[in-house]
Amino acid sequence: MSPRPLDLRLLPAAAGTWAAAAAAVHLDAAGALALGLVLLGGAVLLGVLLAAVLRLLSDGGQSRRLRQTAVHLVLACSLAGAAALTAGLELSGHQESGWDRVVEERAPQQLTLRAISDPRRLAEAGLDGTPRAIVEVEVLTRREAEQPREVEASAVLLLEAEEAGAIHHGERLRGLLQSTPTEPGDRATALLTPFGEPIDQLPPDGWTRLWRVVEPMRTATAEAAESAPGEAPQLLPGMVLGDRSQQSEELTTAMQQAGLSHLTAVSGANCALVLGAVLAGLRLLRLPRWCSPPAAVVTLGAFVLLVHPEPSVIRAAVMGGIGALAIFAGRGRAAFPLLCVCVITLLVVDPWFAMEPAFVLSAAATAGIVLIGTPLQRLLETVMPRWAASVLALACAAQLFVTPLLVPLAEGMSLYAIPANVLAAPLVPLVTVPGTAAAVLAAWLPGLAEAMLWCCGIPAALIAAVGRETADLPQAMVDWPDGGAGAVLGMLYILAALGLVRSLVLRRLSRSGTGVLAAAAAALLALVMPVQAVPGLSGLLAPTPVGSGPGEDWRIAQCDVGQGDMLVVRTGDEEAIVVDAGPAPDPADACLDTLGVAQVRVLVLSHEHQDHVGGVDGVAEGRKVGKVLHGGSRAWDAAAELGLDGVPVHRAEPGVSGRVAGRMPVEWRVVHAAAEAERPNDASAAVHFAVSSRGAPSSPTDGGDRTVDVLTQGDLEAAETRKALDAGMLPEDIDLLKVSHHGARDGGTALITRRRPEVAVISVGEENDYGHPAGVTLQALQAAGTTVYRTDEHGLVTFSLDDGVLRVRTGG
């Protein structure tokens, strides 16, 4: 018996709506409106044209097929135009309210806001070392000529973590705020920061009171979960309510590396489980079938209110409702059309969903389960029990579809995500469904809620254990190969996945089925054992001979800028922290171009001498500079001299630190900055970097094998260096040292002798007139057993990290 064909009639409309929404949110108001009108006009014109053609054709199969095609084309154009018009109308509202002008001018404004999320703490502290947090807000009004003017725009509020902690979802805020524009396509139109005044909380209005009804339930849930076993108190608030504030950084990292982080965020799976429990209860009570839709709507509404109606939660609720609607319809084949309807509805109502990775991943995972979940389960049932086949089929179907999207988003692969999800999947309903019931009861019956959450804590603790153990496995998180190797493997994976999907949907192999399976096996093997793990293979696919450039996996670079200093610490594919800028703009610009750096998170200027700051304009040329942190004497007016418009400039103080998470984690701390020193050299800002390889946690004090400690010194001289050493200001372990003052004699040798760094780099001009580096410095490095690289001899020097081991490449 041949399988029924999939109902893909709405797929073109969904794809067209998504494409139009993604294009519209990147345009200005006029462009988005024009796009919408063109698409709607095209739909009308196409409908009229095809209607005329159909009148000329006689009735028959050909006419019927043409009519169906015409209807779907008109529908696709109409829906795409509607999404573009929605974006254009919202952007027009921003223009008419004057909000766009305010954001572009970055002028402080008195704003009234409403918090639409709970605070989320940032991994990177402020320049003064103060922890920070962000709150997603809706800008309600701005004050113009002493009169409030409505705005209605999304933004992100950046505050100190302590101040942000007092803000809850739904509360209204007012303050004098400065705005910074965001990138086109972002839901948030601006980043808001206080301008010299604290943020005031306004009296509650109707919406605030509504949200405050559920706040005690959320707080009581977290308190009731504290008695749960193991690490369940950290996971339960996240798995039930999407509240990750109780999770430690270590557990969060472990869950990410195990591919289980989606379990601690409200997703369509949460909503589907809660809905499924309610619908199952209605069926047990033998209530009429018509009761299911209103019960589903009420349940979803209450659940969204409980976990907070943020855009991601609303998206999850709509996605989660697909399964319930498919069950009510009594047709499994209705699931894919319902998925398309869901995607179209969300994009027409809110086109900015098109640019949200969570929405993309949710749609992909749902599509995978809908398309191949059942056929894959039937296939697996031939070799394993039905319950095991069901769990494995769901995990594999979702992972197969989301993997091509996760690679560019996460910049790495969780190798054991499928087995980890298979182990965790049976435990999730035991947490989500009774946990949600306990959350509802927590504020009124705390004893009962605590008992229920203790029971839920057993499977939650097991899930945490799965995450921990999985993250500890070899190469739990690995980089996807760059360059040609990554492109080839990516194409192979996609082709193999398409072949497998086709075979599963048709429930038979094509003539080339053997080849498809072989390609699939090769692609999946590439995921389980990346080319980096196979000695020699990476070099065959993407040769990188020493001396040909920095290499694609570089993490630290000493630029060749002549007689000056410039060190670069990579924090992402095209972003980095830059320490000093050399003597002139052109060499600085050329080095960052060679390294592929398009964004400078932090520009650290050790002090005011020209050989360290002369190339600032080159660093900023065509790049976004996030902030400038500088040392040097107190009298140096760095902000005036540098002339970087719109870039925050701050003085470095000992203890100021920051952290960049992600695939290339870096933590940094200013360990010396004596602004009152007699000489500018001794006022240099010295910075300690802890650079982690392959996504391992980094900390200047952890001493782990996977962390490389780097120290930059500016031009610190001998006496000040000894003083800092004696005071314990400089790190005990130094793997890579940027030698002070180009290796000059006055830099001293105490640090080299007492710390004995593994590797040292000296930035120095070829045949310079200063005699740098001094013989005494080179002799001390040799005696310490330190490997030395010099820009006058080696040119650009870059380092990659292989499980904490420095690998060097020279030559630019």
Image: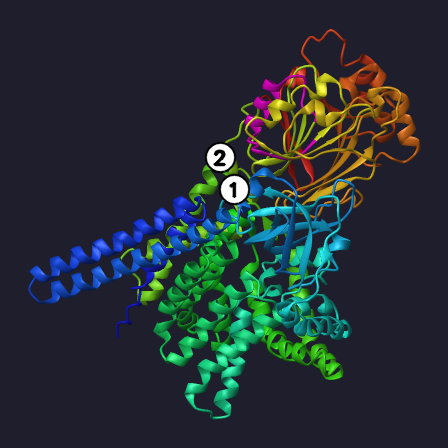
**Observer-nearest residue: 42 or 110?**
110
Tell me the SS state at disc 1: loop
Determine whether, in the image, residue 265 is placed left or right of residue 755: left
Q: Could you tell which of marks 1 and 2 lies nearer the N-terminus?
A: 1
Q: Residue 633 occupies which quadrant of the picture? A: top right
- In what quadrant of the picture does the N terminus appear? bottom left
Q: On the image, numbered disc 2 is attached to which residue?
A: 542
Q: Determine if the magenta segment contains residue 161.
A: no
**Do residues under tags 1 and 2 come within 8 Å of each other at their CB atoms?**
yes
The Cα–Cα distance between marks 1 and 2, rounded to whole angstroms, is 9 Å
Residue 275 place in picture, x, y as percent: 52, 77
Determine whether, in the image, residue 756 is placed left or right of residue 583: right
Question: Could you say which disc has been placed on residue 8 in the image?
Answer: none
Q: At x 49% / y 58%, what residue is drawn?
A: 359
Q: Residue 578 occupies which quadrant of the picture? A: top right
Question: Could you say which disc has been placed on residue 481 in the image?
Answer: 1
- In what quadrant of the picture does the C terminus appear? top right
Is residue 692 visible from the viewing direction of this image?
Answer: yes
**Observer-nearest residue: 565 or 653?**
653
Q: Determine if the magenta segment contains residue 592.
A: yes
Range of the magenta residues?
Answer: 580-603
Q: Amino acid at mark 2?
A: Ala
Tell me the SS state at disc 2: loop
Number of residues whose C-alpha sits closer than 10 Å to that of mark 1, classed few (under 14), some (14–19) or many (20 or more):
many
Residue 643 place in picture, x, y as percent: 66, 25
Q: Amino acid at mark 1?
A: Pro
